[in-house]
C-alpha cells in the first residue's frame, strides 16, 4: 500500500466514523473555496482511480492540510 | 462596562460565514451589561467604521470584534456591496489606538502586517491570524470563536482570552483540520501584559453625566447610554427615536462641579446631526416624556455633554460709550457706539451718513483716564479727526467745526 493509499484509507475511515462532521460545509475565507470533507475525499478517490481527473490548486491545498491533520490524529 | 464594536460585512460567500459567526453576539454582550454597536452588512462601511473608531472625538471604552475579510495590510469592510478598505496602515493609529482588537479575518497578523503596525502605533492588542483562515457554519465553530469574546466580556486578561480561544480550538481538532489549522496561525500581538478591556481601553477624560436616552415615554423601549459628545445618533441606530431622557450624575459629577464654580453640568440634545438645529439643554434629572412640555420627542439626532453657550459676538472692552445725535441739542435720530466703527453709514444705515451734530461721550466699564473718542471725517478712520473725552457736546459745528461730517469713529 502506497503512502497515498494509506492516507486515503485513514481519511475514508474518519469520514465513515464522523458522517456529520464530514458533511459540514467549510470555506477558505481568502479563496472562498467551499467544501465538505466528504466532497474532498470523493475528489481524491476519483483522482486516484482515474488518471483523467486533475485536482485544482485549491483542492490540493486542502488535501495537504487534511493530510497533516489526519496524520496527526 | 465596555463599548463593543462588531464589524461584519456581508458582501460575498466568505463574509456570509463571518457575518453569521457574529449573529446574536450583540444580544449576548448586551445581556452581560455591555454597550454594543453592530456594524453589520452595509453598516460595515469605511465611513461608519471610521466614525465609530476615530480616536480624537470618540474616546470611550471600546473593544473591537472584527469579523470580515482581511489581508496582510488591510482589514476590509463593505461599500456598495463590495469589499472596501476600512483599516490600513495609514489610519491604523487613528482608528485602533487604545483598543483591544480581535479579528477573525485572514492574514492581518502576519509579519509586518496590519496587526503589527496597529500595536506599534498604540493599539493595545491585536489577536488575529498570520495567514488565510477557514470557517464553518456550525455551532461548534461559532462557540469556538465566541470563547474569546465571552472571556473578554467577563473582564479576563487578554492572555486569558487568548488561552480560552486556543483551548476552544484545541478541543475541536478532531472535528476538522480547520481547527488545528486556524490554531497554528493564531497570534496575539500586545503592548503590555495582563491588560483587560476594563483596565486598558479608551477612557473618556471625565464623565460628569451619564445620559440615558429612551425610545418610549416613561423610560420604555430600547435605551442608549451616552457619556460623550455624539454627533450622529444614527450610528447607534437611535436617530429621531428619543422620547424620554434620564440625566444621571456620572462618576465625575462632583469633581466637574468643583472645577466649574458649582455650576451644574448639562447635556444638549440637538435636532440635527453635528449639534445643529434646535437644542434642548437639560441638567441632571428625569424627563419621562420630552414630547410634552419640550415638544422635542423623536427629534434628537446628536448629543453634546456640557454644550457651550450659544456663540455670540462679545463686545469688550468698552472704555467709552458714545451717543451720536442727528441734530444739535441731542435731538433727532440717536445711535450708541460701543466699538470702533470704520463706516458709520454702513454700520448704522444711510440716515447716519454725515448727519451727526451733537455728541455725548460717557466713561464705559473699561474706562481709563485720558481715554478719548476719535471721530473721523471719512470712512476707514481717514480724513481730519476730532478727539473728544467724556462730556456733553451739544453742537460740534459751532464748538469744533465738525457738523454733519462724521463718517467713522474709534472708541477703544
Image: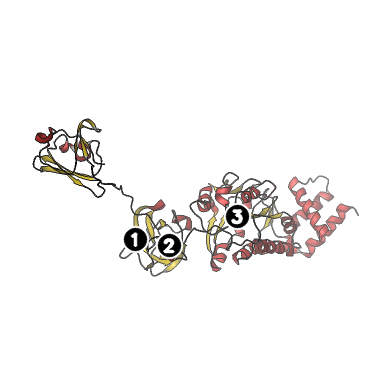
Please indicate whether residue B188 sits to the left or right of residue A2 in the image: left
Considering every residue shown, the one lying at the far front of the view is: B369
Instruction: Calculate the distance from the C-alpha at mark 2 to the C-alpha at mark 1.
Output: 27 Å
Q: Which residue is mark 3?
A: B66
Q: Give residue B296's position: percent from left, percent from top.
A: 34, 60
Q: How is the image coloured?
A: secondary structure
Between B294 and B313, the one lying in front of the other is: B313
Please indicate whether residue B214 sits to the left or right of residue B5 in the image: left
Q: Which mark is residue B256?
A: 2
Within 10 Å of the Cα at label 3, are there few (<14), some (14-19), or many (20+) other Cα atoms?
A: many
Question: Start and end of the magenta stretch?
Answer: B107-112
Q: Is residue B334 visible from the viewing direction of this image?
A: yes
Subunit that carries the residue with mark 3: B
Q: Give residue B157's position: percent from left, percent from top.
A: 64, 63
Main secondary structure type of the part rendered in magenta: loop
Within 10 Å of the Cα at label 2, are there few (<14), some (14-19), or many (20+) other Cα atoms?
A: some
Within 10 Å of the Cα at label 1, are there few (<14), some (14-19), or many (20+) other Cα atoms?
A: many
Q: Residue A17 appears in which quarter of the rendering?
A: bottom right
Q: Are marks 2 and 1 on the same chain?
A: yes
Q: Which residue is mark 1?
A: B296
**Element marked by disc 1:** loop
**Element marked by disc 2:** helix
Instruction: Calculate the distance from the C-alpha at mark 1 to the C-alpha at mark 3.
Output: 36 Å
Amino acid at each position: 500500500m502506497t503512502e497515498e493509499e494509506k492516507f486515503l484509507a485513514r481519511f475514508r475511515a474518519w469520514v465513515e466514523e464522523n458522517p456529520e462532521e464530514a458533511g459540514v460545509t467549510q470555506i477558505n475565507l481568502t479563496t472562498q473555496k467551499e467544501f465538505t470533507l466528504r466532497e474532498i475525499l470523493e475528489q481524491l478517490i476519483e483522482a486516484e482511480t482515474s488518471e483523467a481527473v486533475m485536482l485544482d490548486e485549491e483542492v490540493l491545498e486542502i488535501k495537504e492540510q487534511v493530510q497533516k491533520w489526519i496524520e496527526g490524529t | 462596562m465596555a463599548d463593543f464594536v462588531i464589524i461584519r460585512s456581508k458582501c460575498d460567500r466568505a463574509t456570509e460565514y463571518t457575518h453569521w459567526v457574529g449573529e446574536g453576539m450583540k444580544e449576548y454582550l448586551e445581556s452581560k451589561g455591555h454597550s454594543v454597536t453592530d456594524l453589520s452588512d452595509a453598516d460595515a462601511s469605511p465611513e461608519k467604521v471610521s466614525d465609530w473608531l476615530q480616536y480624537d472625538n470618540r474616546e470611550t471604552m471600546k473593544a473591537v470584534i472584527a469579523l470580515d475579510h482581511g489581508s496582510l495590510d488591510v482589514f476590509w469592510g463593505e461599500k456598495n456591496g463590495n469589499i472596501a478598505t476600512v483599516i490600513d496602515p495609514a489610519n491604523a493609529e487613528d482608528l485602533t489606538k487604545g483598543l483591544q482588537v480581535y479579528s477573525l479575518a485572514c492574514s492581518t497578523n502576519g509579519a509586518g502586517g496590519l496587526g503589527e503596525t496597529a500595536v506599534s502605533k498604540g493599539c493595545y492588542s491585536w489577536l488575529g491570524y498570520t495567514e488565510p483562515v477557514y470557517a464553518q457554519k456550525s455551532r461548534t465553530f461559532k462557540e469556538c470563536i465566541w470563547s474569546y469574546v465571552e472571556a473578554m466580556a467577563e473582564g479576563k486578561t487578554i492572555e486569558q482570552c487568548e488561552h480560552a480561544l486556543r483551548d476552544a480550538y484545541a478541543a475541536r481538532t478532531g472535528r476538522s483540520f480547520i481547527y488545528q489549522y486556524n490554531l497554528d496561525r493564531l497570534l496575539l500581538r500586545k503592548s503590555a501584559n495582563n491588560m483587560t478591556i476594563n483596565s486598558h481601553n479608551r477612557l473618556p477624560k471625565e464623565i460628569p453625566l451619564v445620559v440615558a436616552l429612551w425610545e418610549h415615554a416613561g423610560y420604555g423601549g430600547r435605551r442608549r447610554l451616552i457619556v460623550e459628545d455624539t454627533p450622529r445618533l444614527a450610528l447607534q441606530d437611535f436617530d429621531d427615536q428619543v422620547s424620554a431622557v434620564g440625566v444621571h450624575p456620572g462618576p465625575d459629577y462632583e469633581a466637574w462641579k468643583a472645577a466649574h464654580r458649582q455650576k451644574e453640568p448639562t447635556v444638549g440634545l440637538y435636532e440635527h446631526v453635528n449639534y445643529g438645529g434646535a437644542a434642548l439643554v437639560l441638567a441632571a434629572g428625569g424627563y419621562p416624556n420630552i414630547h410634552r412640555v419640550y415638544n422635542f420627542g423623536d427629534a434628537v439626532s446628536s448629543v453634546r455633554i456640557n454644550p457651550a453657550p450659544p456663540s455670540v459676538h462679545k463686545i469688550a472692552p468698552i472704555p467709552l460709550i458714545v451717543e451720536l445725535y442727528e441734530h444739535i441739542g441731542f435731538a433727532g435720530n440717536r445711535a450708541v457706539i460701543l466699538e470702533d466703527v470704520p463706516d458709520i453709514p454702513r454700520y448704522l444705515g444711510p440716515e447716519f451718513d454725515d448727519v451727526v451734530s451733537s455728541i455725548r461721550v460717557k466713561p464705559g466699564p473699561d474706562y481709563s483716564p485720558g481715554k478719548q473718542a476719535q471721530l473721523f471725517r471719512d470712512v476707514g478712520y481717514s480724513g481730519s479727526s476730532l478727539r473728544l473725552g467724556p462730556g456733553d457736546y451739544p453742537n460740534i459745528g459751532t464748538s469744533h467745526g465738525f457738523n454733519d461730517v462724521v463718517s467713522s469713529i474709534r472708541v477703544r
